[in-house]
Image: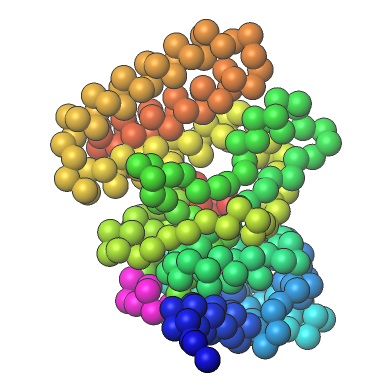
Amino acid sequence: MVCNLPAMIEVSAALNSVQQRNSAHVDVCVCTFRRESVVDLIASLSRLDLPAAAQIRIIVADNDETPSARARVDAAFAAHNLNGVYLHAPARNISIARNACLDAATAPLVAFVDDDETVRPDWLARLLSEQAKTNAAVVFGRVAAVYPEAAPAWLAQADLHSTQVQVRNGAIDGGYTCNVLMCRDAIGALRFNPAFGRSGGEDTTFFSELQRQGAAMSYAADAVVEEPVTASRASLAWLTTRAFRSGQTYGLLRLRKGESRAKVFAVSLAKVAVCIAAVVLQIWSPVRWRKASVRAHLHAGVLAAAMGKAPLELYGAAHA
């Protein structure tokens, strides 16, 4: 009998990969601040189609001054017979809540989703499959925005509320915590920076540092969570404000990486000018000129960072 050793090794590796995926233990982390929708998220987690022998524990960190979410979170855990942990992690700084989740996590794999989302039944299985296939330390999923029927037509057509990875020079650039699976060993002692805990951007800086450390990152477009777009967010004003803040974070990252302030200023100023021109030239299209406007505000945020303007503080009072 002739044995094909390379083929046998490949089959063995595949079997080991499947076994690891099927026996995965995952801590699913959620940060919440005065949102009753966290109950809907927990309910959706109870409906996950998990691979055989896979187990999850849900960690909810309440970032309010008082433990205002404790009763509804504990009741949701009990109603759906879920293994869950409630943490009180005050106050009004999302980095504090995220770090409380990481400190409480004990499973080899850690996932993050937002408290205003719901997960599809195959969400976690898709992330686990991608992680097993690529052996990536970080796997991002996709956030699909759900628009209300009363929303203007351009809003859903532009779909600027949905989230997916950005690729730059063939690699994932930055990252987000609204849909992600991570190997806890890869995170190590790294934590979210409280300096960005009120402005946002704490996830961008976190994943930028992981990437700098060499962590492999992958993307599972079929691992989907859904996020309803509320009336307060269904506007160009909200989108441009968010884009401006994101630009500030990106600008700060570029400065921290050693780019000169003058270069960041000049490049972002030029991009703002191009985007403003695009707004004028595409004013005939309700979708295109608004997309260009959002891009203009993004680059204006980078420009503001180059000028030393402090990041906008959006988390807390405006978080609901």
Give the number of marks: 0
For this view, does 269 lie left or right of residue 313? left
Q: Position of residue 260 (x, y in %)?
A: 16, 36
Q: Is residue 62 above or below residue 52?
A: above
Q: Residue at position x 38%, y 63% from top? A: 216
Q: Is residue 54 visible?
A: yes
Task: Answer above or below: position of 307 versus 121.
Answer: above
Measured as percent of width and height from the top left, residue 320 is found at: 63, 52
x 30%, y 22%: residue: 269
Q: Nearer the viewer, residue 3 or 156?
A: 3
Residue drawn at x 50%, y 48% is 165
Viewer-proximal residue among 26 and 36: 26
Tell me if residue 35 can be seen: no
* Drawn side of residue 290 relative to residue 76, left or right: left
Query: Considering depth in this image, is 319 or 127 the residue closer to the camera?
Result: 127
Question: Measured from the top left, where is residue 155 in percent x and y?
Answer: 69, 30
Q: Can you name the residue that lies furthest to the front here?
A: 1
Horizontal placement of 281 versus 246: left or right?
A: right
Q: Is residue 179 above or below residue 187?
A: above
- Quarter-wise, where is residue 236 in the image? top right
What colouring method underlies this structural image?
rainbow
Image point (17%, 29%), residue name: 262
Residue 11, given in percent of the width and then of the height, sits at: 54, 80
The verdict on residue 279 being magenta is no
Q: Which residues are magenta?
A: 184-190
